[in-house]
Amino acid sequence: MLYEQRDVKQNEGEQFRRVFIDDYFDLYVWFSDKAEPVGFQLCYEKTFNERALTFVNGNYSHTGIENGDNCLAGGIPLLMADGEFGKKEILERFIVESGNIDEVIRKYVIEKIVEYKKEM
């Protein structure tokens, strides 16, 4: 079940963000000055083949996350183009795992997952 990570370091000059985690998902959500969600990154399958669906500035991307030898100096993971997004499976699991998070955030992420189309 996703739970909010408290005391998330905020980066100067960047939008405010909140982070939710569990064993399968990491969810990063960015907010406008009016405290409305404006973007997110949903990382999933963290233990085997980690990938991420990102929605920022009205655009989607689906990427694989390289955490191994191909990381940048300092161990910074790389996002690399990835194949098919298993929308149905991820959506179903997110609905179950997100029952404890803020309903505004939950609905926003669900809506954007539903709207995702590969050609975007």
Image: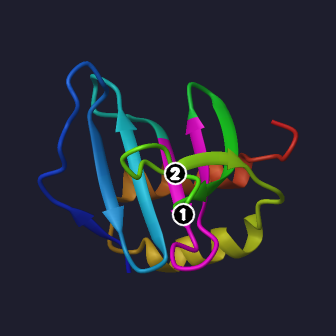
The residue type indicated by label 2 comes to: Cys
The residue located at (54%, 63%) in the rendering is: 68
Q: How is the image coloured?
A: rainbow
As helix, strand or loop, the secondary structure at mark 2 comes to loop
Q: Please state the horizontal and vertical placement of residue 117, each as a whole percent of the image.
A: 82, 46
Q: Nearer the viewer, residue 60 or 92?
A: 60
Q: Is residue 75 left or right of residue 62?
A: left
The residue located at (59%, 67%) in the rendering is: 50
Q: Nearer the viewer, residue 86 or 52?
A: 52
Q: Is residue 11 left or right of residue 102?
A: left
Instruction: Check whether the beta carbons of the residues at disc 2 and disc 1 lie within 8 A of each other.
Output: yes
Q: Please state the horizontal and vertical placement of residue 28, each as a whole percent of the image.
A: 40, 50
Q: How many marks?
A: 2
As helix, strand or loop, the secondary structure at mark 1 comes to loop
Q: Please state the horizontal and vertical placement of residue 107, each as a whole percent of the image.
A: 49, 55
Q: Is residue 82 left or right of residue 110?
A: right
> Rounded to the nearest whole Å, what is the CA distance between mark 2 and mark 1?
6 Å
Mark 2 neighbour class, 10 Å CA radius: few under 14, some 14 to 19, many 20 or more: some
Name above or below for residue 46 compared with residue 85. Answer: below
The residue type indicated by label 1 comes to: Gly
In the displayed image of the protein, which residue is found farthest to the left? 7
Q: Is residue 18 magenta?
A: no
- List the residue tagged with mark 2: 71
Locate the N terminus and report the quarter of the image it occupies.
bottom left
Decide whether the magenta segment is chiefly helix, strand or loop: strand
Q: Which region of the structure is painted magenta?
A: 40-55
Locate the C terminus and report the quarter of the image it occupies.
top right
Mark 1 neighbour class, 10 Å CA radius: few under 14, some 14 to 19, many 20 or more: few
In the displayed image of the protein, which residue is found farthest to the top? 13
Q: Is residue 41 magenta?
A: yes
Q: Nearer the viewer, residue 92 or 79?
A: 79
- List the residue tagged with mark 1: 68
